[in-house]
Image: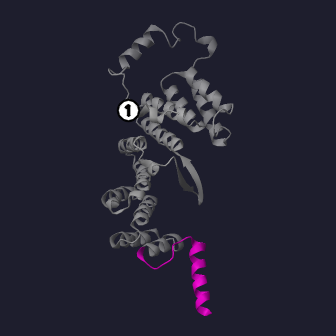
Amino acid sequence: MEMKVGITEKKLFHVFHKVPSGDGPYVQAKYAQVVMKDPEGSIIWFWKAINTGDRVDSALKDMAVVMKQLDRSEEAIEAIKSFRWLCSKQAQESLDNVLLDLFKKCGKVDKQIALLKQKLRQIYEGKLFNGRPTKTARSHGKKFQVTISQETAKVLGNLGWAYMQKGNHMAAEVVYKKAQMIYADSNKACNLAHCLIKQARYDEARYILEDVWSGKYLGSDDTRTKNRVEELLLELDSKQPPHFLQNIPGLNLDDDFVNELNEWARPKSRRLPIFEEISTFRDQLAC
C-alpha cells in the first residue's frame, strides 16, 4: 500500500511541476531548470543528456532556450549547428525556429533572412508540416491548429521585418504585400504602412492605417495595434504637408527636383532580392 502511494505521489509531483518522469540526465536538467530555478546547472545536465543520447531532440532545443535567457545566444547557435545532426527529422523545424530567435537576439539579420528564405523554399517543396496542410502548435500550454497558409504568411512577415531592420523598405514592402495576400492581419498592415512612410508614399500608408483603425484586419481591436496606428499617423502628419499646402510650388512631392533626386537614388536593377526567392513558387504562395 505504501509503495502505491509513493508511486502516485511521484506521478503527481511530475504533473504539478510539468517535468518528465524518470531519473536520466534530461529529467535532471528539467528538474534543475523548472523546479530548482538553476539555469546554469540545467545546462550541465542538458549537455550530459546530449552526450549520452537521452532525449536529444528536446535536450538541445531546451538548452538553447536557456542559453538565450542567460545571454549566451552565440554559444547556443554553435551548439545547434554542431549537434542538430543527432536530432530526428521531426525536430529540425523546431530547431530552425529557435535559431531564428537566436539570430534575432544577436542581431544577425543576414543569417535570419537566409534561414527564412530556406523555410519558404521548404514550404514550396512540401517539406514543412511533413506534407500535411495543418500542424498542431503549442503556445502558453495550449494546443491549436496552424494552416500552411498561416505559416507562410508568418514566415513572410518575419522576412519583411528582417528587411526593415536592414533599411531595405522596398523589399520589405513586397514581402508584406505578399503576406497580406495569403493571410492578412493588422500587425503586417501596420508594418507595410511603415515601409510606405519610409518611401514617402504617404497617401498609400494613410489608406492602410485608416483600414486598420476601422477594423478591417484581424487584430485591429487590440490596444497595442490602436496605439501603433496612432503613432504611425502622428509620424505621417509630421512628414506630410496639410492638403491645402500640397499644391504650393516647392512643397509638391512630385515636382521635377524631387523626381530627379529619386532617379539618382534608384538602384540600377529594379529586381528586388525577394523576387529571386518567391517568383519561382508564386503560385504556391498565392491565396
Judge left or right: residue 134 versus residue 26: right
Within the image, what quadrant is residue 70 found in? bottom left
Looking at the picture, does residue 42 appear above or below residue 161?
below
Colouring scheme applied when the structure was drawn = one colour
Q: Main secondary structure of the magenta part?
A: helix
All told, the count of numbered labels is 1
Q: Is residue 250 magenta?
A: no
Looking at the picture, does residue 57 appear above or below residue 249?
below
Q: Position of residue 169 (x, y in %)?
A: 45, 30
Q: Is residue 4 magenta?
A: yes
Looking at the picture, does residue 113 appear above or below residue 57?
above
Magenta span covers which residues? 1-25
Q: For the N terminus, which image quadrant?
A: bottom right
Q: Residue furthest top?
A: 249
Kindly identify the amino acid type of the residue bearing the numbered disc 1: Thr
Give the camera-side residue of 106 and 19. 19
Give the camera-side residue of 183 and 29. 183
Q: Position of residue 39 (x, y in %)?
A: 46, 68
Within the image, what quadrant is residue 42 found in? bottom left
Residue drawn at point x = 40 percent, y = 44 percent = 122
Q: Position of residue 2 (x, y in %)?
A: 61, 92
Q: Residue furthest bottom?
A: 1
Residue drawn at point x = 39 percent, y = 72 percent = 54
Q: Position of residue 271 (x, y in %)?
A: 36, 25
Judged from the image, the secondary structure of the residue bearing numbered disc 1 is helix
The crowd level at tag 1 (other Cα within 10 Å; few <14, some 14-19, many 20+) is few
Q: Which residue is mark 1?
A: 280
Give the camera-side residue of 57 and 104. 57
Judge left or right: residue 177 versus residue 217: left
Q: Residue furthest left?
A: 82
